[in-house]
Amino acid sequence: MKKRHLTEVQDWMRENPVTIEPTATLAAAQELMSENEVRRLPVVERGELVGIITNSDILRQIPASIDETDDATRLLLTQRTVREVMTYSPITINPSATIQEAAERMLEYQVSGLPVVRNGKVVGIITESDIFRLVVESWAEE
């Protein structure tokens, strides 16, 4: 029988992640990601998780023919909202779930991060990077 990794998500998640409203512009979302050095934002409306938006979601909105720093791009990103491109009802995980469950869920749904939700509220986010950090730290202890 294989040994399962029982470390809990709450031990490795980033608490109180930066979130965004669905009415925000894509430009605002991109700026928030850049300022906070994150690649995804849980989308929260009236305190409830309604979606998730990633940097890739935003970049897909920019036609390949125009430069990302160009004025036309800025205009495009200020005219579109998060609601228009976010993923609705994202795959989530509970803080007391194991890292093993989080990793399995990420693989199954082919996502690189999961909002951590308790009673409908976003309390954290766990990403592939957090799981890599766990792997590196546990290997270092051996």
Image (spheres, rainbow, N blue to C red):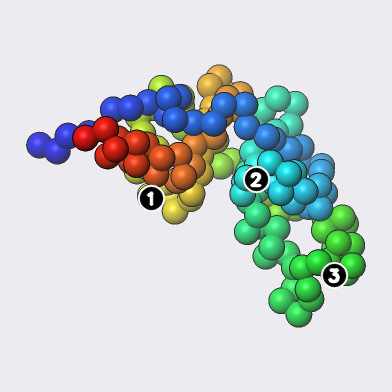
Give above or below for 139 relative to 72: above
Q: CA distance from mark 2 to mark 1?
A: 23 Å
Seen at 77% across and 48% down, the residue is 31
- Comparing marks 3 and 2, which lies closer to the viewer? 2
Image quarter in which the C terminus is found = top left
Place residue 75 in its image quadrant.
Answer: bottom right
Type of amino acid under label 3: Asp
The one of 136 and 105 positioned closer to us in this rendering:
136
Q: Label 2, on which residue?
A: 37
For this orientation, the residue located farthest to the bottom is 65
x and y percent of residue 91 in the render?
Answer: 50, 41
Seen at 49% across and 42% down, the residue is 127
Alpha-carbon neighbours of circle 2 within 10 Å: few (<14), some, or many (≥20)? few
Q: Label 3, on which residue?
A: 70
Q: Label 1, on which residue?
A: 107
Type of amino acid under label 1: Leu
Seen at 78% across and 52% down, the residue is 26
Q: Tag 1 or tag 2, which sits nearer the N-term?
A: 2
Q: Tag 3 or tag 1, which sits nearer the N-term?
A: 3
Q: CA distance from mark 1 to mark 3?
A: 36 Å
Q: Tag 2 or tag 3, which sits nearer the N-term?
A: 2
Element on which disc 2 rests:
loop
